[in-house]
Amino acid sequence: GQTKVQMSAFDKGHSINYQRIEDNLQVVRSRLNRPLTLSEKIVYGHLDNPHEADIRPGASYLKLRPDRVACQDATAQMALLQFMSAGLPTVAVPTTVHCDHLIEAQVGGAKDLARANDINKEVYDFLATATAKYGIGFWKPGSGIIHQIILENYAFPGGLMIGTDSHTPNAGGLGMVAVGVGGADAVDVMADIPWELKCPKRIGVHLTGKISGWTTPKDVILKVAGILTVKGGTGAIIEYFGEGVTSLSCTGMATICNMGAEIGATTSVFPYNERMGQYLDATNRTPIRQYAESFAHNLRPDQNAEYDQVIEINLSELEPHINGPYTPDLATPLSKFAQAVKDNNWPDKLSVGLIGSCTNSSYEDMSRAASIADEAASHGLKAQSGFIVTPGSEQIRATIERDGQMQSLEKAGGVVLANACGPCIGQWDRKDVPKGTKNSIITSYNRNFTGRNDANTATHAFVASPDLVTAMVFGGSLTFNPMKDSLKGADGQEFKFSDPSGKELPPRGYDPGENTYQAPPQDRAAVNVAVDPKSDRLQLLEPFKPWDGKDPQGLPVLIKAKGKCTTDHSLIGAINEANGEANKVQNVFTGEWNTVPETAKEYRDKHHTGWVVIGDENYGEGSSREHAALEPRFLGGTAVITRSFARIHETNLKKQGMLPLTFKNPQDYEKVRPDDKVDLIGIKDLKEGSDVTLRVHHKDGKSEDIPLQHTFNAGQITWHRAGSALNHMAKSKQ
Ligand code: F3S
């Protein structure tokens, strides 16, 4: 039968499409003939073309159709400007924008928010009007952190989502495959272009036993990070399974998935279970729970599914961990931490403890922290260190205010900040310690790279559960171990903390708090997108010009790059063969030496010509950011000719309307000189598998022809013809 379950309360007319997963998997199973893991089911269940997709984990690339897109305010600006340049009337899949990254923490909640509204007015006005115009849900400043709002409202088991923020995997706590991407990937999906992902490898984490006492879900990921290190998850989806899973709350599973980003994982995901069901009920999504239950066979791994690697963790034996400083994979069990502080000469005095953020802001987290604060208060104690609380969403803030946890935290000396990223992303006007002073802080966040929180490179930042952070704030030192050490109460009596306790879900239901959501209006034609022409933060983008129908002629070589080069930041890191230097090239028309981007602009604006880049092996490696392809196109580039390409960058160049071409004989790279001008013959007749000739005109008047090849397919050729994939999409929708 046809079941229609709406994807979220805000997405009228968009229902969850489990049937597509079912249909896709039927095709994929008959092709692969082996049991599938959970992430394989969800990912392959969203294939654009299950019949023809090349499915080889860790090797091939998949074209996928995500269910939805989420953007945070820092990355949404460029994404929306790009989307607008296509001239499409509306986004192809449900999309939301969240204002959370631009709010600086100074004195706390309301005042900080008011200041942010003032400072960022032009950005917020732009986002509010652009989202309204194109049918995007808009979460205003003060609504909360993107990942918390996604979990509360939008994530659903078996879904596929992309988000323009690294901790998008948080939604894996509700069984969704949610991947952090760059802005241009989001633009593709918003414009109905399939999204390309390297077929993920599968790392299984087998959880046995039961979590209890001071050990929290956070400690699972702190432990996994210690095992896999910051690179160990690269290219893989981390899948949790085993009987230990059901001892974790849904929001706890989200914490684990969130911080999986710290080990480079594509994302992390949990199988559907009753804890997710309870969370769906508590957040008013019972129809989704029922639908997921009826579809549970595809929301868990097949029997005997095979993983590329399996990690075993017994939750009954798992200790609380503290990770850091300076890197999230330096994991130390609590029982060994005090000694590690001494051995490494880390500053023992704890200056500030910070709880909350997108990683650890659940009702459960706040209740457990409050239980610790209450116990300390009952002994007359106040926080010995600074104590900062960042609620993840307006709903969490309002609920803990109503239920009293906020008062407990404030009574203990806690300062409650606006519902936003704040100190987690360095939006922290920290006053207690001058820059350059060595000091220690401990957070319940996910990242602790040098200077991330307070821009002070001498700050030693540690990451732990909110329980440990809160307890240590009362101990005032890093060497305090609440499981073992006692504290002296105001009455002079020694006491030891009891095990933290807290409610997983609010017994009286969530309080939604203030309404901070702006739905796109019915009549969107009347909406004008607000871009101040004087703005130095925002600038409307012109669509790239379509191809002029001719074979390009007389193009200068902007740079002949030698050896490995990352193409991020407009090629400024590439080594010029002509002089062995980075970011210094000669204008072939004027003979002047200038930076790469300036010279490209001169070609574009003064000489009205395109240009080519000559590159070496594996060109564009590590440049998965779409910007790496967008920038050369913006600067007027026509073609990039190399010995070979990194695959993602090659595709990105095609999407932007550039011509990635390779030497048929790699040694021909040597024949091109940095001061040549070149023609490209065969672009007019570009077809799948066709040949292209590079005719180089040397400065000495001699010319030679060099055979090239390309990997364009018919669809990608239409991108080149239209000027970009986005232009093509816009044209085909007219
Ligand atoms: Fe924001 Fe920090 Fe999360 S920056 S999205 S709270 S990782």
Image: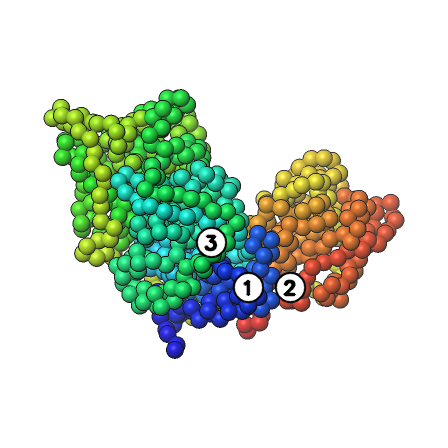
For the C terminus, which image quadrant?
bottom right
Left or right: 347, with 185 as reference point: left
CB of mark 3 near ligand 1 (< 8 Å): no
Circle nearer the viewer, 3 or 1: 1
Which of 500/607 is in front? 500
Q: Tell me: residue 480, above or below residue 675.
A: above
Q: Tell me: residue 74, above or below residue 525.
A: above
Which amino acid type is marked by label 2?
A: Gln
Which amino acid type is marked by label 3?
A: Val
SS state under label 3: strand
SS state under label 2: helix
Circle nearer the viewer, 2 or 1: 1
At 74% across and 63% down in the image, what residue appears? 689
Circle nearer the viewer, 3 or 2: 3
At 70% across and 45% down in the image, what residue appears? 617
Residue at the spot of label 2:
716
Q: Is residue 460 visible?
A: yes
SS state under label 1: loop
Instruction: Return the residue found at the far left.
Output: 491
Mark positioned earlier in the residue sequence (3 or 1): 1
Q: Tell me: residue 507, above or below residue 368.
A: below
Residue at the spot of label 1:
33
Residue at the spot of label 3:
179
Quadrant assignment, res 273: bottom left
Which amino acid type is marked by label 1?
A: Asn
Quadrant assignment, res 562: top right
Q: Are marks 2 and 1 in contact (CB under 8 Å)?
A: no
Q: How far across and how far down the image is residue 173, in percent? A: 37, 53
